[in-house]
Amino acid sequence: MSQIPLEVNLPGAGFLALVGSGEYLPAMEEVDRWLLQQLSGPARVVTLATAAGSEGSQRLRYWDELGVRHFSSLGVDSVEPLPVVDRKSAEDERLADLIRQANFVYLSGGKPGYLYHTLAGSPVWQAICSVLEQGGVVAGCSAGAMIFGEQIPGIRNLVQLGPGFGLLPGSFIVPHFDEIPQVLRNGLRAVHPQSRLIGIEGYTALVCTRQGCQVRGRGQVYISKGDTFLHYRQED
């Protein structure tokens, strides 16, 4: 993989894919097909709309149905949306067991703070980590990507940082980076000089393993370094 200057702290030999935007849409087919090819056996996909758990049943159903259609169109025979929508369901051992039986977990978008606090310390979070331990794929888009940094920017107040799971130590992740004005990019970097800002554009994934990180998709990934940003694209 490309030598992108990032420290990663993954619990196993799996692939962590952090997506800027566009989960389950046609523009992400090439990226997700590549991720499926990294699996050692037949794909067993579970989708989690947990980040939208406070947005009502209609929104949850939208993400569930979109995820099933997307992965089915990629030839996946086993794809199942799981109703992990709140703290009670995140502590459901039955749902956690279903995740452990999967080798590809996809966390779609919504509210990053809600997602983090719903999963933190739960059996479902432990099950997600077990997929990485076993060499599987864990993908997160937008809010689903933000939780893997050491800190999480607020949605309405990007200057305020909350706790994250820390799989990318010392970093905070900003999705939709192509939609953020340059002045705000520079402001975020200036306000948090001790933290590494990772900006991920739409329809783009930063894919990390213990061996390194690379970019997949049509956009760029930006990483703050001092007063500047380094930027990376898919190389092949």
Image (tube, grey):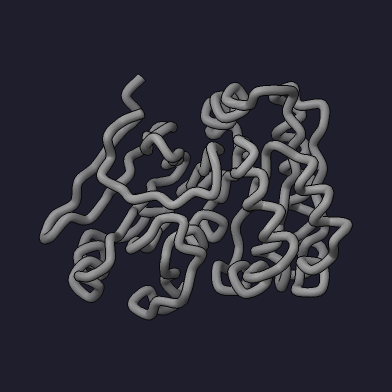
Residue 204 appears in the rendering: no
Residue 227 lies in quadrant: bottom left
- The location of residue 57, given as percent across then percent down, is 82, 65
Residue 139 appears in the rendering: yes
Q: In the image, 103: left or right of 229?
A: right
Residue 218 lies in quadrant: top left
Q: In the image, 185: left or right of 115?
A: left
Residues 179 and 50: in front is: 50
Residues 80 and 166: in front is: 166
Residues 46 and 94: in front is: 94
Number of marks in picture: 0
For the N terminus, give its image quadrant.
top left
Q: Is residue 107 above or below residue 117?
A: above
Residues 203 and 206: in front is: 206
- Farthest right residue? 94
Q: Residue at x 25, y 72 (%)?
A: 192
Residue 110 lies in quadrant: bottom right
Q: Residue at x 49, y 48 (%)?
A: 10
Q: Residue at x 76, y 46 (%)?
A: 100
Q: Is residue 165 above or below residue 26?
A: below
Q: In the image, 86: left or right of 38?
A: right
- The location of residue 144, given as percent across then percent down, is 57, 56
Q: Residue at x 84, y 56 (%)?
A: 95
For the C terminus, give its image quadrant.
top left
- The location of residue 146, given as percent across then percent down, is 48, 60
